[in-house]
Image (spheres, grey):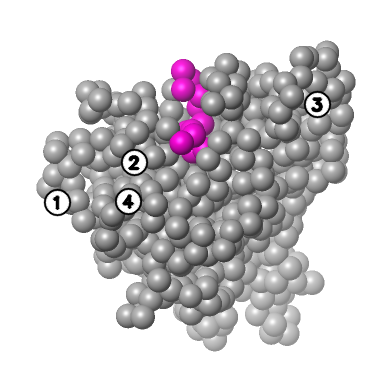
Amino acid sequence: MIDKLINNLIKLPLDPRTHLSNTRWRPALPPVGASICAAEEATVVSALELRMRPAAGGLPVIALPVIALPVIALPVIALLVVTGGCAGGGDGDGQGSGIGTTTAAATISEVTGFGSNPGNLRMWEFVPPGLPSGAPLVVVMHGCTESADVIATETEWNELATRFGFAVTYPEQQSSNNFQLCFNWFQTGDISRGQGEALSIAQMVDSMKSRHGSDPARVFVTGMSAGGFMTTVMMAAYPDVFAGGAVNSGGAYRCASSLLETTSCQQGSVNRSPAQWGDLVRGAFSGYSGPYPRLVAFHGSSDFTVNAANLDQSVAQWTNVLGVDQAPEVDETFRTATHRVYRDASGADVVETYTIGGMGHALTVDPGAAVDQGGATGAFSEDHDVYSSYYAALFFGLVSDDGGDGGDDAGDGGDGSDGGDDSGGDDSGTDDGGGDGGGGALLETFSAGGAPDNAGWTLGGWAVDSSRDADGAPGSASLGGAAAPAFNTVTRTASWSGLTLGAGQVLTYARQLSLSDVNVAASARFQVIVNDGADHVVDSKAISGIASYAETAWTPRTADLSAYAGKTVTLKLVVSATDPLSSISSARAWVDQISIE
């Protein structure tokens, strides 16, 4: 009772992002053109001092004394929330990454009168035009300080819904329930079947079924952070409603059942056996004997807010519930992730995990135009070359063949997509000189003695670099670009113009990146852009704040260019960095083996 009372009084935002030891901080100096609100997360003050850590979870940046406040004699609650409600507004890079990100927020519509709504939540929906009755439904839940439109923009579930034919509904928290707009994933009255926020979300599903004819056998749920924890709530409390769930940076059901338990939960220190974890789920709907939802989960290996041990606990819980052992049938490296798959006796994938190397507390996205790329970077979404929404949709069985279902081969960037290496002996690209091949194959290997092989290039500060080469042939080289700002922004753009594209053509290339930001106001990025009169980002990598990213080996990349069939376009390679506070941040990129075929 006392923890419920305290939460109601001070509205402590019990999301993984807002505990004292893991608070992220940004100073009152945002990047040029960005709102400081868009770059901040909630800040927590103790009675003695404000401890601040960089986003990557490194050493404290500053310890600042504050006015002493009355201390409540409870372990976690000597805290007072002093800012919030503004995260999720983006990382200030203005890039508009991904397919259709600028329209995602505008296309959701609010739904009222969807039920008794005991949890006092708001409901939003996206239904693609012409969606027939009997289509699947995905429920998407935001993290703390976020909103329905922010999570729609970052995840691009609306774009996937349009591509693959399903509806999306977005529960949204209200500040009257939680000051930081966190779903109350730890409160018994909100995580039990037939009560509070859990019942409100179930009523939203009923509303979608009655108004749009959503298929009751194909209803899925996903969420980020507090929304990720709420995802396992819905899977456990309503197994008769949901066929599967996708958890991003969340954890097991009833990891915490009160305010006082949230700290040990988030630290990953709750000690239960798989059977004990499973019993919590089985006890959520007493007497239920039907099938339970399948689980896919994404988690950062460097998440110091919701420790990666929470992913292991989710695996323990749901493998036990689904009756499979904890030895994965697949254990592999997939791009930046360790990818594991747990299968039942029939060979069906029932639990799947992606541990994203080096990622903190974030949603992983992969902006670009390839079939398995998408999502937009933001305050709590980062580009780690794995588009979690797509791979969740793939796990749910929502990805159709004509959309490029990718599977394990779709996104590894190496299997059959490294066009440069496989087509190194093909002369068709160089014969096309300037790219006027009328939709024929094009190849650029930078092997023409210190210059590009083809006409039509404007290097714009980039240069042929013989010290790095993806081909390995004598005399071959790559194209390198560097942006080194000194209290400003520097952008270098190399352009290959006059490329006439045919139907179904695909861009493949190899790259090496070295991006470094040394302060919270810095950013660095690399982009591949197709210009048909307007710029379209088809591949990108960006970092911001105190962060770094490096590719020490050549990384194959691919992008679908079918949208530009019949057009004459310019291919742009852009490297850019901003640092208003120093001359140390930088962005460097090397590109080789560019193939369009």
Is residue 33 positioned above or below 198 on the image? above
Which of labels 3 and 4 is toward the front? Answer: 4
Q: Is residue 373 left or right of residue 474?
A: left
Q: Earlier in the sequence, mark 1 or mark 2?
A: 1
Q: Which mark is residue 134?
A: 1
Other-residue count near label 4 (Cα within 10 Å), few / some / many at <14 / 14–19 / ≥20: few
Q: Are marks 2 and 4 in contact (CB under 8 Å)?
A: no
Q: Amino acid at mark 3?
A: Leu
The kind of secondary structure element at disc 1 is loop
Q: Earlier in the sequence, mark 3 or mark 1?
A: 3
The answer to if 73 sits in the magenta stretch is: no
Is residue 136 positioned above or below 445 on the image? above
Q: Amino acid at mark 4?
A: Ser
Is residue 222 positioned above or below 312 on the image? above
Q: Which mark is residue 50?
A: 3
Q: Nearer the viewer, residue 585 or 461?
A: 585
Q: Tell me the residue that label 4 is attached to.
A: 286
Which of labels 1 and 4 is toward the front? Answer: 4
Residue drawn at point x = 14 percent, y = 44 percent: 213
Other-residue count near label 1 (Cα within 10 Å), few / some / many at <14 / 14–19 / ≥20: some
Q: CA distance from mark 1 to mark 4?
A: 29 Å
Q: Is residue 450 left or right of residue 122?
A: right
Q: Amino acid at mark 1?
A: Gly
Q: Provide the residue span drawn in magenta.
A: 175-188
Is residue 569 positioned above or below 415 on the image? above
Residue drawn at point x = 53 percent, y = 64 percent: 274
Instruction: Give the quadrant of the N terminus.
Output: top right
Spot occupied by residue 52 in the image (x, y as percentages of width and height): 79, 33
Residue drawn at point x = 84 percent, y = 38 percent: 60
Residue 21 visible to the viewer: yes
Q: Which mark is residue 193?
A: 2
